[in-house]
Image (tube, coloured by chain):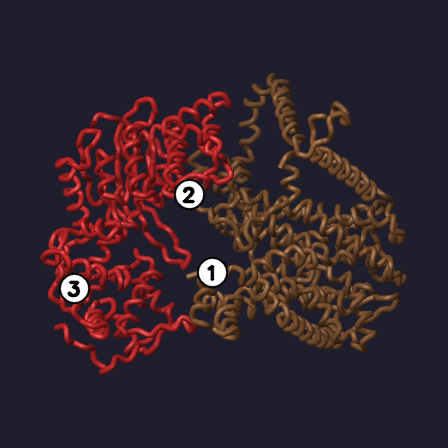
Amino acid sequence: MKPLRFPTALTPPLLRRLGLADVVILGLVAGAIATVVAFAHEFEAPFLQAVRIDLRPSALPRYTLYSLMRGVLALLISYLFALGFGWAAARSRAAERVLLPLLDILQSIPVLGFLPGLVLGLVALFPTRNMGLELAAILMIFTAQAWNLALSFYNSLKALPDPLRDACKVAGWPPRRTFWQLEVPAAAQGLVWNGMLSMAGGWFFLMVNEAFRLGDRDYRLPGVGSYMSVALDQGNVSAMALAILAMTVMIVGVDQLLWRPLVVWVEKFRLDETTGGAGGRASSWVLDFLRRARLPRRAARLRRRAYLTARRATRPLEGPLRAATPVILRAPRFAFEHPIARKLAGGLLVAGIAAAAGLGLWRLWLLLARLGPPEWGQLAWSAALTFARVMGAVVLSTAWALPAGVVIGRSPRLARALQPVIQVVASFPAPMLFPLVVLLFERLGVGLGLGAVALMVLAGQWYILFNVISAVAAIPEQFADAATVFRLSTAARWRTLYLPAAFPALVTGWVTAAGGAWNGSIVAEYIEAGGTLRVTRGLGSLISEATAHANFPLLAGGIALMSMIVVGWNRVVWRSLMGWAQTRFGLGT
Amino acid sequence: MTTDALLLEAQHVTQRFRLPNGQVLEALRDVDLTVREHEVVALVGPSGCGKSTLLRLFAGLARPAEGTVLYRGQPLDGVLGAAAMVFQSFALLPWLTVAQNVAMGLDARGVHRGAQRDAVARAINLVGLEGFEAAYPKELSGGMKQRVGFARALAVAPEIMLMDEPFGALDPLTAENLRSQVVDLWRDPATGVNTLVVVTHSVEEAVFLAGRIVVFGSNPGRVREELVNALPYPRQERSPEFEAMVDRLHAILTATLLPEPVPAAPQRLVPFPRVHVSEVTGLLDHLVMLPGGKGPVFELAEDLGVDYDRMSAVVRGAEQLGWVNTPGDIVQLTQAGRELLAMDDAARKDATRARLSKQPLFARLLAMLKEEGAVEDEEVLADLTIYFPFIPAESLFHTIIEWGRYAELLDHNVDAGRLGLLGTPEGTPDTRVE
């Protein structure tokens, strides 16, 4: 395809050598800069507890961009965290032993419960500016994004073939270069795919993160989530529809402009040489478009020239600097390389972490000690109710997602057509739809006690569907051929081939779906829709209510209990089920 | 030759590894080896004898658990700058072009940009890769990839080139072509490379390349024998002198790999070689077609397309079951072996059962199972680790299960993780073959 060009006569001389792609890039860059500047203003704005949210449609684009900025910033922080965390865990056996279980716990506990503490702390830190509230929102999004990225990076590092590492060492690469040129590229594919998942996961609590009540205080940040929540408060149906539309446009836009090109680009960093997964090679119209642009190449040339100029300018300084560097570096190098110093530093680090953990446990204990037997009884009963709902949601999700996943996974055509659609739908934050679903249920006469199960299905079902689709799509063609040759009936095919082959992935899906359902319970059992509050008994509503009434002992108790149930269930039930599924039904020999 | 300076020395080197299941394996024990300037040294021996481990120690990629490694009399501290390395799996970074891969080692050696371009061009020229500079590794064939591997090593003009089975992943034609090029590169003073250390699985390759061949034994890895190979370069693979040298190396390897059975105490436990049932019967099927039912082990390896170290394991398995004898490097089918081949499947299983029940390791295991009923896998694995500390217990366990199942002796339940006895038809082992 030829690059798209403007007619020469109509083009100003400065643009004459540039294509349409370059102009689009310039526009995007300008837009991004404008957004960042506007968002920085937002950060610096004087602190107001409840910003007035403008429900006019014209305000929505700005709000959506603000929300997007929060998600992107949180993702950047998540990536930094993942690189550091994964590197440390893969590098040191001691760190590995501490960090991996920690990660496992962090990714399975309901982080939303920490929002009140985070907000109070950060707002106290920046009493006059919006910064505290903004940081709290970004950190909350971060807590939904970071863990799978860290795990993915760690796994990639662990899977790196030894000869590649050896080759870099023999070449004399310093650790920093090996990190950026071997370890990060080798992990790039996993990091991008998980970044996609993280971004979607980060939107889940958008509404709560941008607008929530703590006791008698009302915290609100301008964004599409708070827009939706105000629209719900006022029962403004058209504003709700607009917010959902804006959210959808944002998700599709991010998917097409950011993730698709990235997914195609990181193909380059594939380590094994087997080509492509299911559905053939990915393609991205945006990347094709961008590759035709001339501007990036020009920018690169300019940058190189600037670099050379800078080098020339600093040349007089290089001599003294070269003499000074070893002296400057000696102390840290000594600290890192000397065995005793290293042990000491490690010991101090461990002691610091232990002290922080001890302090945290002590504070938690003080809070929990204020709960009496009736409160504990209430907690236990609520936990049982929510547990039943979570399991119900897992069963219901499986009931539709398993057959649908098998059907989609078996048909490459269907998978190709539906995958992008499902991806976008799955990225949509389910809690935004909760109020609408609840109103619908009320029309049908279903109470929130049961309705919450349906809401939790919304929060967890996609994980099951995705896992089943990819597992079934990965069944080697020979198995299907064998089933055809031996004339297996459809029922026998499902029983002997599809279901067993999908089972390990199904278990993985269950783990995440149950996690999503537990998280979802916090917003599904306690819902404000059409200006009225609906509550059903459960651990989720207990946490939400404790937040709303600033009842910190009960809040701490609820979070601790939920964390314990989720982590315990993961450890005992899911893990053994997963091990069994792998040895019994794994397709690897 | 002996007047040349000592380049690399391993003194009393011992190296250990911890397997994922916690077992500690000794890869090298008390190894002494020197490499002199202008030498080509080949390290040969069965897999698991630690020859690759020693190569990594020479490169400074690992530190020995005990002992020292010296370069020109100085203890090695970190990666050896005077060495470059070539890997069996090529170890090229897939996201770098050929030229970028070749340039990998130049920055650390302080070569500035302009000189780097020259060094890369020179190295690419030496291995005949002109025109491929901008290609990515995945676009190249295996042979071309290894040329990039050599170019990357040559680009830094190393004093020593360490090669870990550099032709192991290549097809025979490509390997042969590249092998003679390596000799040319070594003899060419322009490359700067004056010493080669190569780990190989091929006897011909060792004789073709090396001036000194070091034979390693396994369990634990140590130096068994050194063979000086003074044939003039370039070597002719079909010449009688070459063949004679190959035969000498064969003889040494046979003594290492297929030692004459020592009339030891009958209770002494011998590990069963980790080979499959079908490999042993395949060997017998092949032998019976040969005149006299016998052949030299290295010819068998070549005919059957497996490397000598695998072949000798299969032979040892067949020998333990009494189906072959191994006088010297000859493998001879026994009467029992011939009888086995004449049997139908059921009778073969009976015969194997009788033989296996007498193999000391199986006998001990069967006695234990008879006494205790079914036992946990973990328990058997722990026992194996104690009996044979140098053998990965997990893989030995799988071999035992395969043979035990084939002979209808053992019953293994993966789900429960337990091993038990399978009731024999008459309760007593069949003795028809005796």
Asked if marks 2 and 3 fall on the same chain, the answer is: no
Q: Is residue B208 above or below residue A546?
A: above
Q: Position of residue A542 (x, y in %)?
A: 76, 69
Quarter of the image where the N terminus of chain B is located: top left
- Which residue is identified by label 1? A476
Instruction: Residue at 24% x, 56% y: name it.
Output: B313
Measured as percent of width and height from the top left, residue A505 is found at 55, 64
Q: Nearer the viewer, residue B417 or B98?
A: B98
Q: Is residue B156 left or right of residue A301?
A: left
What residue sits 63% from the left and 30% below the top? A297
Cβ–Cβ below 8 Å for labels 2 and 3? no
Q: Residues within 10 Å of mark 1 (few under 14, many from 20)?
A: few
Residue A95 visible here: no
Percent x, y of residue B168 = 32, 44
Chain ID of residue with mark 1: A
Camera-near label (2 vs 1) is 1
| Residue A111 found in image quarter | bottom right
Q: Which residue position holds label 3?
A: B323
- Tell me the element at label 2: helix
Q: CA distance from mark 3 to mark 1?
A: 40 Å
Please state which amino acid type lies under the numbered disc 1: Pro
**Is the Cβ of the residue at disc 3 closer than 8 Å to that at disc 1?**
no
Looking at the rendered structure, the secondary structure element under dot 1 is loop
Using the image as rendered, state which of residue B92 and residue A341 is in the foreground.
B92
Q: Which chain is red?
A: B
Query: According to the colouring, which chain is brown?
Result: A
Q: Looking at numbered disc 3 in the image, what kind of residue is underneath it?
A: Trp
